[in-house]
Image (tube, helix red, strand yellow):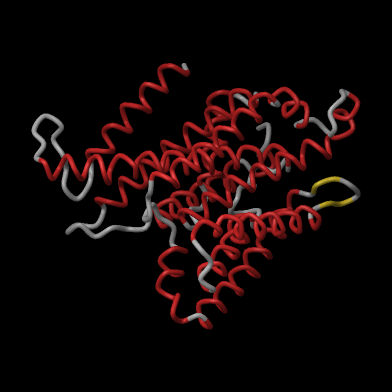
Amino acid sequence: MKPVLSVIFVVSALVFMLIGPNWINPQNMSAMELSILTELRVPRVLFSAIIGAMLGLSGSIYQLTLKNPLADSFTTGAASSSALGAVLAIAIGVPVHFISVFAFVTGMAGLMMVYRLSLTNGRINPITMILAGVVMNVVASAVISFSKYYFEDSLNSIVYWLMGGIFMVSWDRLAISVVIFALTFIFLHRQSMKLNILALDEHSAQSLGVNVHLLRSVVFVLSTLLVSVAVSFSGIIGFVGLIVPHVSRSLFGSDMKQNIFYSSLFGSFLLMASDTLSRVIIPGGAELPVGIITAVSGGLFFFYLLQTRRERFWNG
């Protein structure tokens, strides 16, 4: 199945590169169309693919380690707290290469606060987890709103960035994202057996030789690193990490060796498709921020989960 889906993914990516306000015929391209394809469409599709993979993979890890099927970078507050650092960096004029550092620091701090608040007698309470994530989103949104009010000179940049989108694409950003994702993916893939054991209760996992605290801490840091880099480069693109792990588990089971791969693949495909739709949904060449599309689709999927799964979320 992996080779088939991989081929479908590559073919879809090639097709998405041809779609836009001006559709490109690969058999009859002008010099301008070739320039648009190579300088704009190709890096943008590749960038949306890697950002989607980062968000999908991080969502899969969050849901496993927190034992919460509604956990992702958005609902746990990791995305909003990462956005807080990025917004503050933009507002005070920090060089663009250091925005990711600010996003990672605040994202990690926010996630650790949510994690601590959700612990009850040493165990994670899924309901408290979501509530703590909501509180973190509210607090981060309040500080971001203050930043928009106080730093008026950066208002347009902040607002446009917060909507989420594949706007500022460059080959160096793409390279950084690919390297970070590849290293994280390889590490998590090698730890997939331990991650499967981590899905058990903590006592059982400890008795099987897994250092639960250390493993959870490491994968938290790596997942938040993925989120912070994605947020700092593309703004807040919500719900990708919520949707694709569920689709992956529904189709291919809960084995993390499979789930890591398919969550990354489906995350790439979802964001590539959403970004392509954002380029053509408004007539006349105007572009809709892709974060709006993923928020609508993710919100509807969230309602679907709440309506159909409820008490059967994780194994049902």
Is residue 236 positioned above or below 37 on the image? below
Q: Nearer the viewer, residue 314 or 306?
A: 314
Q: Nearer the viewer, residue 48 or 114?
A: 48
Residue at the image point whose x is 73% and y is 53% from the top: 129
Q: What is the total number of numbered labels drawn onto the structure image?
A: 0
Q: Position of residue 293 (x, y in %)?
A: 39, 53
Rendering quarter of residue 192: top right
- Left or right, 31 with respect to 119, comes to left
Q: Position of residue 205 (x, y in %)?
A: 84, 29
Residue at the image point whose x is 72% and y is 60% from the top: 132
Is residue 124 positioned above or below 246 on the image? below
Q: Position of residue 36 (x, y in %)?
A: 21, 45
**The C terminus lies in quadrant:** top right
- Left or right, 24 with respect to 201, comes to left
- Left or right, 203 with respect to 103, comes to right
Is residue 115 positioned above or below 38 on the image? below
Residue at the image point whose x is 75% and y is 26% from the top: 194
Q: Nearer the viewer, residue 41 or 277?
A: 41
